[in-house]
Image (tube, rainbow, N blue to C red):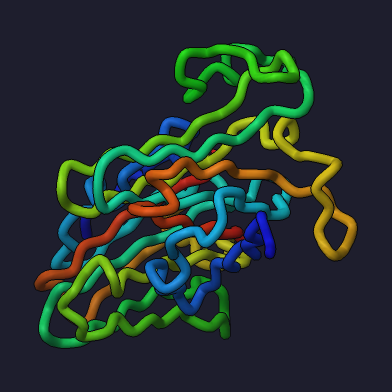
Amino acid sequence: MATNQTIVPTPMVATGVAQESFIAQPTQATVLYTPSANKDFIVIGSSSGTVNVTVQAVSPCNMPLACYQGSGAGKPNDHGLHNFIMTVTSTGTYVEKTFVIPYIDHYVDPSQLDVNGNAQVALACDAGMTTNGKIGIFEMP
Amino acid sequence: MATLTPTLLSGAGINESSTMVQAGSCGDKFKVTGNRCFIRLSNAAANSRTVTIPNQQPLGVDITVLLDTLLNAPANDKMIAFPSIDAFVDTDGYVNINYSAVTSVTVGVFQLP
């Protein structure tokens, strides 16, 4: 049984992308995707309560302030580095937010390779995400 | 023609829908500050709408997008990106957006850092 879900970023095109068609509830607690040089953005939705998606930093960041952004309490992870956390809160109606992960290079995990051998980013979804959340990943041309 | 200000996406997260505005009755335009921007369009009307982004190059092909008639916006929102935005920039530095009708149409422009 797979423990990770791989999402291939949806290419943005001039003919228009129906965004909601590519945003869905994660099937696994960990979502993997292959980033492409600062061209990706992530849409996270919540239909109830607060949902969190944590991106674990795997290499030191030379700009600590940026790494702290969105990192909750700012506590370092097991690597002594600061994770990046994307949070969306719904108070009853469905809410969506669009995120760009800053300094994405610091979150690319060389131990998580895609079928082409490219390192991926691991997105850890909390229980709220897997019950009330949605996620979509998009890639600019 | 109304001027739209692109919203910069960030790590803090943006609720795109909350930044979208009513489409301008004479169309909209926005200043290009980079190649990584996209337009989001929503149609809550009972009729479909056609949105055209004119290509400013000789013999260039316009971008034409049909916004469906579904009434469950934002489920039928469409996002438009530009493979090469330069072709759509007019002599004043703006990308223009024209609508077949504007009732119940909202629009937003978003910029990646």
Please tell me how many numbered marks the rendered image carries: 0
A22, above or below B65, in the image? above
- Please provide percent x and percent y for residue A69: 50, 21
Identity of the residue furthest to the right in this view: A117
Identity of the residue furthest to the front in this view: A1
A27, above or below A109, in the image? below
From the viewer's perspective, tell me whether residue A99 is left or right of residue A91. Answer: right
From the viewer's perspective, tell me whether residue B30 is left or right of residue B111. Answer: left
Q: Is residue A139 visible?
A: yes
A113, above or below B82, in the image? above
Q: Is residue B33 visible?
A: no
The residue positioned 38% from the left and 68% from the top of the image is A20
Quarter of the image for the N terminus of chain B: give it: bottom left
From the viewer's perspective, tell me whether residue A123 is left or right of residue B65. Answer: right
| Location of residue A11 by image quarter | bottom right
The residue positioned 41% from the left and 82% from the top of the image is B64
- Please provide percent x and percent y for residue B46: 11, 84
| Location of residue A87 by image quarter | top left
The residue positioned 55% from the left and 65% from the top of the image is B82
The residue positioned 18% from the left and 69% from the top of the image is B105
- Please provide percent x and percent y for residue B80: 45, 68
* Of the pair A111 and B13, the residue shown nearer to us: A111
Quarter of the image for the C terminus of chain B: give it: top right
From the viewer's perspective, tell me whether residue B71 is left or right of residue A30. Answer: left
- Please provide percent x and percent y for residue A78: 71, 19
